[in-house]
Image: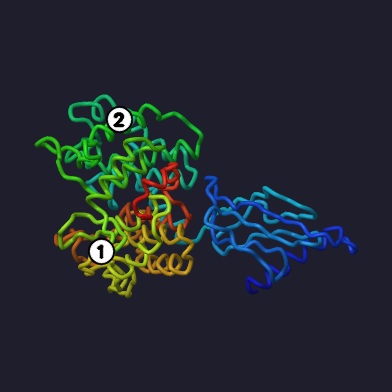
């Protein structure tokens, strides 16, 4: 049965339950919003008001139906969602109709989520790879976001509790900040990067918003203070700290993360935007660059994350992403050609995580065809777990090419499931945008340099 037949049957079922008024001549208007479970509007949903007539929700999930004459059933339809309620009936001017969309589960998304639940250690941490010895702060932030997106409060809190218990001993100790890496027992090592700490704050912001809980406000405030402490007089943010002290390198990706992670809008944000305008903006290509005057000045995540983080960012950046980074490569693990996006302009592998980031950006931009195409391509990279039952995952890359810049990826990057690829795949499947909570900032139009 086709979608059109389903719509016709459902619409007729509900319309016959209405009391038909043959003498109705006055027209009226119906309006409402289609939300996801996080009260964020869902764009591009077809809202039917007859078997053949519908309107599309806009970027904020809003719809309006004009010149309605008779009582009618309002029916949202999208192949990737079920809706609550599944319909409503209007017989006169009706404003503020609300539908909630619940993403449809698939066998693949269930198997990937199963991988997350089984990969979590008793201390709450998620190794970055299956049975891996490395635990990444960024990957644990992503895993926490996956649990938030799935509504699994307990598992998200298992990750947050680990870091919450280390505010004094680690986050607020010495130079401050959480280490980028640690072992499975939780012993930290390595650099304390700005971006990784920002992602933990982004995850906590999503948790607070979704579960209406202030449990981790102290952790959020401590992270916020540390991130703010890295800002220079010119508005830039230092990269963090290593064993030699302050990292006096300004990483565009990390600064985008910080802009989103620090909620609201104040001088921190305005100074940061001014720095990006003066030092990291290509007016010719309408995009944020990684490093000026560098062969590798273009990095994929600055395109997708820039679009998802900065209000009213030009949609042209997504078209530029396609031109600069899109490639088809043979997936080592499945021996299937996969189309997707590379880390940089080398175009020597498909970065599955980056492809998932692009799908989320396409979904935000209501570029439905592009989002669905690359999400399907990501699924071509799925492999069965060697460690967990009824679980699947996606490797880091299609093949062992280079990551950002020229260094080769590690052995197994093209064959073993990893947290980052799995997380962005599930974000795409669940239509979950981690940046959405920090997106609306009431940024003055004069500060939106990308519009000038």
Q: Residue 286: horizontal and vertical position, in percent?
A: 31, 60
Q: Residue furthest left?
A: 244
| Front-most of residues 418 and 324 | 324
Q: Quadrant of the C terminus?
A: bottom left
Q: Is residue 62 left or right of residue 329?
A: right
Name the mark on residue 2.
none
Name the mark on residue 225.
2
Name the mark on residue 414.
1
Q: Secondary structure at mark 1?
A: loop
Q: Is residue 213 above or below residue 423?
A: above
Q: Does residue 112 appear in the picture of this structure? A: yes
The numbered mark, 1 or 2, whose residue comes first in the sequence reads 2
Residue at the image point whose x is 27% and y is 65% from the top = 342
Q: Does residue 183 appear in the picture of this structure? A: no
Q: Residue 295: horizontal and vertical position, in percent?
A: 15, 63
Q: Residue 282: horizontal and vertical position, in percent?
A: 26, 59
């Amino acid at each position: 049965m086709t979608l059109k037949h389903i719509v016709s049957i459902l619409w007729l079922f509900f319309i016959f339950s209405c009391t038909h008024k043959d003498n109705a001549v006055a027209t009226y208007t119906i309006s409402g919003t289609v939300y996801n479970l996080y009260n964020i509007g869902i764009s591009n949903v077809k809202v039917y008001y007859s078997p053949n007539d519908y309107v599309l929700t806009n970027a904020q999930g809003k719809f309006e139906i004009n010149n309605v004459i008779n009582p009618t059933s309002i029916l949202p339809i999208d192949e990737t969602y079920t809706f609550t309620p599944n319909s409503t009936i209007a017989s006169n001017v009706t404003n503020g109709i609300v539908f909630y969309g619940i993403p449809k589960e698939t066998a693949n998304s269930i198997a990937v989520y199963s991988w997350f639940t089984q990969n979590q250690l008793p201390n709450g941490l998620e190794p970055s790879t299956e049975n891996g010895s490395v635990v990444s702060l960024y990957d644990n932030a992503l895993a926490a976001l996956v649990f938030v997106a799935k509504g699994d409060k307990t598992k998200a809190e298992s990750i947050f509790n680990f870091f919450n218990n280390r505010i004094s001993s680690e986050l607020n100790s010495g130079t401050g900040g959480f280490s980028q890496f640690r072992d499975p027992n939780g012993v930290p090592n390595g650099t304390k990067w700005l971006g990784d700490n920002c992602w933990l704050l982004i995850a906590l912001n999503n948790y607070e918003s979704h579960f209406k809980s202030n449990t981790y406000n102290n952790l959020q405030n401590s992270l916020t203070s540390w991130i703010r402490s890295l800002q220079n007089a010119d508005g830039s943010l230092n990269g963090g700290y290593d064993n030699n002290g302050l990292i006096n390198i300004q990483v565009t990706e990390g600064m985008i993360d910080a802009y989103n992670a620090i909620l609201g809008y104040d001088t921190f944000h305005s100074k940061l935007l001014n720095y990006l305008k003066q030092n990291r903006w290509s007016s010719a290509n309408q995009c944020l660059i990684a490093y000026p005057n560098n062969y590798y000045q273009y990095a994929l995540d600055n395109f997708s994350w820039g679009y998802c983080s900065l209000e009213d960012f030009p949609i042209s950046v997504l078209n530029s992403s396609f031109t600069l980074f899109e490639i088809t490569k043979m997936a080592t693990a499945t021996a299937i050609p996969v189309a997707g996006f590379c880390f940089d302009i080398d175009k020597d592998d498909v970065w599955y995580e980056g492809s998932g980031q692009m799908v989320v950006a396409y979904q935000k931009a209501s570029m439905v065809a592009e989002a669905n195409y690359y999400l399907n391509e990501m699924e071509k990279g799925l492999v069965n777990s060697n460690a967990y039952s009824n679980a699947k995952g996606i490797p880091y890359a299609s093949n062992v090419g280079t990551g950002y810049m020229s260094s080769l990826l590690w052995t197994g990057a093209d064959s073993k499931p990893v947290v980052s690829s799995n997380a962005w795949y599930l974000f795409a499947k669940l239509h979950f945008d981690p940046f959405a909570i920090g997106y609306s900032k009431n940024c003055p139009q004069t500060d939106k340099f990308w519009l000038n």
